[in-house]
Image (cartoon, rainbow, N blue to C red):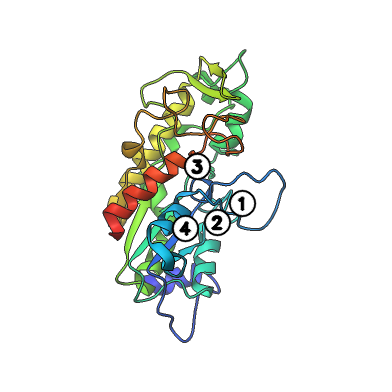
Amino acid sequence: MAASTALTAIPGAHAAPAPEGKPIVVLGDSFTANVWDPLPTNECLRGPTAWPAQLTGRLGARGAEQVADISCLGASIDTPPGHTLTHETRAGATAGAFGPATKLVTLQFGLNDRWGGSDTSLWDAMRACVFDLAEGCGTEAVAEGRMPDAQAITGAAFADRIRNAVTYIRYYAPAARIVLVGYPELFREEQETVCLNFFGVVPFVQPRGRTIVEYLNRMDLAQREAARELNVEYFDARAVTTGHGLCSPEPWVNGVFDPTVKFDGLPFHPSPTGDAVVANALYERYVR
């Protein structure tokens, strides 16, 4: 019955005859696809140094045959207007990605979604508040409606939003380990300020950035709780990237046109080094 419900929620996800599936299936947002697209597009763009590409490289000459990367820049769990987890799961089913040969399915979502009735996501709100030195992103920003309330991000809510896709994947890829991939460290969980490097030499510091840090902390906690509730695994990307957030001595996160990290890298997203660390950790834990 659960699988039937999931199929109803993922229209067009039926495939006949049943495919064998790919050994590894990757679903996710821009932290998975990790490519900067300055022009609007409906295509699912993916970067050549993103962690799925680097994980594929670890598998050798036949890596491309073993990995189905269906991640999309700008994707969300279920928040329009971009691609969603349902869209990606349906695309994977159409491509024959799920089947008895599937051993690993990863999901990395949440930061592009709206939570708790808010009309904005974290990334949309950040664009306004990070560079606003007059008002900033302090705790009062939530009450003033300039930042979404991090308290609305709960494990139960997260689990409910991904449950149909997890049920579908579990049914059609019964041998797969389903792994909810967390986000890497952008800022230390206790810090009050946030910053961003410009051109590798000019750090922009927002002294009142606590709500951004709290939002990321709550997302991490909600993902862990959702993984437990749904009986899937959680991969702690924060743990393997600790100490390498923005404006750290050795950042593994892109600034703006920063040649010391990646000049054309997507700001606030992992550098090639950061993605390599995540890819290697996933390979060692789930693939090797």
Cβ–Cβ below 8 Å for labels 3 and 1? no
Cβ–Cβ below 8 Å for labels 1 and 2? yes
Q: Position of residue 210 (x, y in %)?
A: 46, 22
193 in relation to 40, above or below: above
Q: Residue at horizontal 44%, vertical 27%?
A: 213
Earlier-in-chain disc, 3 versus 1: 1
Q: Amino acid at mark 2?
A: Thr
Q: Position of residue 231 (x, y in %)?
A: 27, 57
Q: Residue at horizontal 37%, vertical 52%?
A: 180
Q: CA distance from mark 4 to mark 2?
A: 10 Å
Count residues near mark 3 (Cα–Cα under 10 Å), then give few for <14, some for 14-19, many for 20+.
many
Q: CA distance from mark 3 to mark 4?
A: 14 Å
Mark 3 = which residue?
Answer: 111
Q: Is residue 40 left or right of residue 187?
A: right
Could you say which is closer to the camera, residue 187 or residue 7?
187
Earlier-in-chain disc, 3 versus 4: 4
Q: Quadrant of residue 154?
A: top left
Whether residue 1 is visible here, answered yes or no, is no
Q: Amino acid at mark 4?
A: Leu
277 in relation to 125, above or below: below
Instruction: For mark 2, give the secondary structure.
Output: loop
Q: Amino acid at mark 3?
A: Leu
Instruction: For mark 4, give the secondary structure.
Output: strand
Mark 1 = which residue?
Answer: 80
Mark 2 = which residue?
Answer: 84
Mark 4 = which residue?
Answer: 27
- Mark in the foreground, 4 or 2: 4
Q: Is residue 12 left or right of residue 230?
A: right
Earlier-in-chain disc, 3 versus 2: 2
Q: CA distance from mark 1 to mark 2?
A: 7 Å
Q: Amino acid at mark 1?
A: Pro
